[in-house]
Amino acid sequence: MKKLIIITVATLTILVGGFFIWWNLPLTINRSTEIKLGEEIIIKIEDYQKTYGLPGEDDWEALRKFGFQDKIDFLQPEYRQLDNHTFELINDYP
């Protein structure tokens, strides 16, 4: 019985400690896939912009072609056209 309690406490300590370590890692480590996706999307939008100009925020068909992930009623990362030459990508991760 004592062994079971020690194993349980040790397991929970390792899990909680691992979570806090993961949470405090730099974004370049624990969000590398999102960063890579954003960089690929930026390159595709800039190539598109050279020929056609920036796509509108409501041009979901064009945005999907760039690699945006469809989350039913919105695309991720979020795309905002600031003016005719400037845009921004926002990824609100939990």
Image (spheres, rainbow, N blue to C red):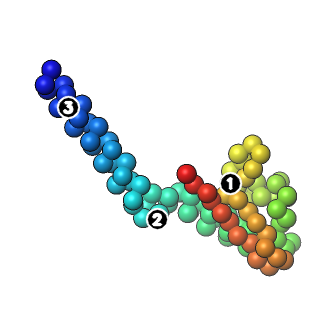
Q: Quadrant of residue 55?
A: bottom right
* Tag 3 secondary structure: helix
Dot 1, how many residues are within 10 Å of its Cα: few (below 14), some (14-19), or many (20+)? some
Dot 3, how many residues are within 10 Å of its Cα: few (below 14), some (14-19), or many (20+)? few
Question: Of residues 5 and 54, which is closer to you in this image?
Answer: 5
Numbered label attached to residue 76:
1
Question: Of residues 85 and 41, which is closer to you in this image?
Answer: 85
Q: Nearer the viewer, mark 3 or mark 2?
A: 3
Label 2 or label 1, whichever comes before in sequence order:
2
Query: Where residue 22 appears, x then y in whole percent?
Result: 38, 53
| Residue 47, placed above or below residue 13 | below
Numbered label attached to residue 28:
2
Let me know if residue 46 appears in the view: yes
Numbered label attached to residue 7:
3
- Report the side of 4 relative to 43 (left or right): left
| Residue 24, placed above or below residue 49 | above
Identity of the amino acid at label 1? Gln
Identity of the amino acid at label 2? Thr
Let me know if residue 48 appears in the view: no
Query: Where residue 23 appears, x then y in whole percent?
Result: 41, 55
Q: Residue at x 71, y 67 (%)?
A: 44
Question: Could you give the CA–CA distance between mark 1 and mark 3, rounded to whole angstroms?
Answer: 41 Å
Do residues under tags 2 and 1 come within 8 Å of each other at their CB atoms?
A: no
| Residue 65, placed above or below residue 50 | above
* Tag 1 secondary structure: strand
Q: Residue at x 45, y 57 (%)?
A: 30
Question: Of residues 53 and 56, which is closer to you in this image?
Answer: 56
